[in-house]
Image (cartoon, coloured by chain):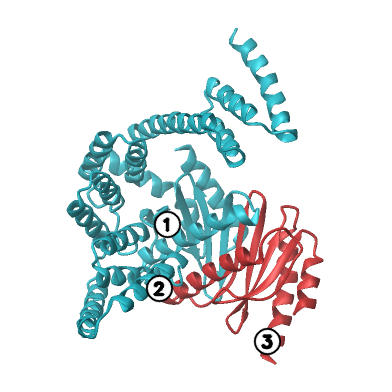
Amino acid sequence: MQQILQKVNRIVGVRGSLIVDREGFVVASDMSDRCSPQTLAALGASVASSLASALSRLDRGTFERFVVTGTGGSVVLFFIGHGTYLVTLLNTNAMLGMVLVELKEAASALQEILSL
Amino acid sequence: MGWLSSLFGGNEMDELERVIRDAPAPSAFLRLAHLHMEQGNASKALEVARKGMERFDSADLRACLVDAERVSHLAEADQIKTKIERFPNPTLYARLATIYLEQGDLDACTRTCAIAVKAFPDYAGIYLVMAQVSRKQHMQDKVIHYLEKATEMDAYNYAAHMMLAEELVALQQKGEARERLHMILRFAPDDERVMQLLSDLEADMSSAASPAADSEQASGLSSNEQKTEAHKSEEPTRHLKLSSPDETEVEKNKTIEGIMKPITSLEGVEAGLLVDRSGLIVACRSIPKNFDEELAAAVVSNVCRAVEQSAGDLGIGDFLEASVEGDAVTLQIMPVNDMVLAAFATPAVRAGRLQRAMHGCVQELAAS
């Protein structure tokens, strides 16, 4: 898991990434940034649980990905499976389209590890 | 002379900003805040005074902060009044009343609430402000009455449920308070604040409970649960009707929905919602049957609240937009002034086109 996170962090514009479970506990993290993993994990878990529950009640399937963009960067949340999420913090210079492709691959790799 | 003083003021401001950057001192923050005030830029003055207070807790800076807040609020109140004249809308009344409340002008706040209730009787948000005024006036019966009204009209109003739970705790009606908190968890699962309050409440109740009280509590719980279930089945089919007695206002509300048309006319878009920060629907368009727009609005405002709470700590700046993708849905969210615009679409929607339509709509709404 750590290796996958390190690979994610080598993508241009990525400030850090972590894996969080639905309770908000950090499963693995690689945050080179000053930002606290707990803050990122709390946002990830809070948004993920709220969206997953609401989409199910709205009969709109399951939640897969959440991207929030601010004036100073973005946060991307990918559902990995088994109640865990890959959360990535990006700079404004990140090429979002490319990053999403890479993150999807990373999420698949993490899913395989979690299925073992 | 105006331009000359502005020029000198500008030079001095540059110099003060440099001082603040290199060797910050309370006097520099104070002077810069005053210069911004003199130039009529109250919001900038407020920002400088806040930054100053974060570093130095000085009495002068505190007084300056209070002053800047007052001027900034007055400027905002004037802007809102102008907007209300052109484009009456219940959230504007609620914001105006809140400004008066924050300024301690309870009479003006009460008057604004009365006008809003008359013009928009179905808007729950104003009852929340009325409860806040009543709390300031120590009229607890009224506080409870208005909060019950607000939650009855809007079963997903986080702030109203939360305030009601706090009031009930203060009145030692802990079973009912717990019930209110559980209601919030139905639309904001795992909400940290609610979970904390619930755990405190449970601990408090279990420590206070005697064997006799235990049985009483157990029967109280079951009756509460029954009430909750009953409430679920008869949950108000709340819908914020933007219609007012005045036909021109109805026309204006139609205009909001007109502005949203480029979004909802896109292929794959199921619904467009304009929601205020407490999760109330200001306008909605193309809502399909069996789509719970109140729940959708509550989710949208929850996501915004979660993002805005963490954005500063994460260093991602001001919230610009968010997108959610699921196996059967695409949801796009954008803040606009004190509201949030959201579009629910199928995964087949062209994300770029939806985003462009949303940006256009946000600009139009902001300009209106």
On screen, residue B138 versus residue B194, left or right, reads left
Label 1 marks a residue whose chain is B
In this view, B185 is above or below B71: below
- The quadrant of the image that shows the C terminus of chain B is top left
The residue where tag 2 is placed is B199
The secondary element bearing badge 2 is classed as: helix
Q: Which residue is mark 3?
A: A114
Quadrant into which the N terminus of chain B falls: top right
SS label for mark 1: strand
Q: Is residue B162 above or below residue B7?
A: below
Label disc, if present, on residue B101 of the rendered structure: none
Query: Mark 2 or mark 1: which is in front?
Result: 2
Where is residue B312 shown, x and y percent of the image? 60, 52
Disc 3, SS: helix
Q: Which residue is mark 1?
A: B273
Mark 3 vs mark 2: same chain? no
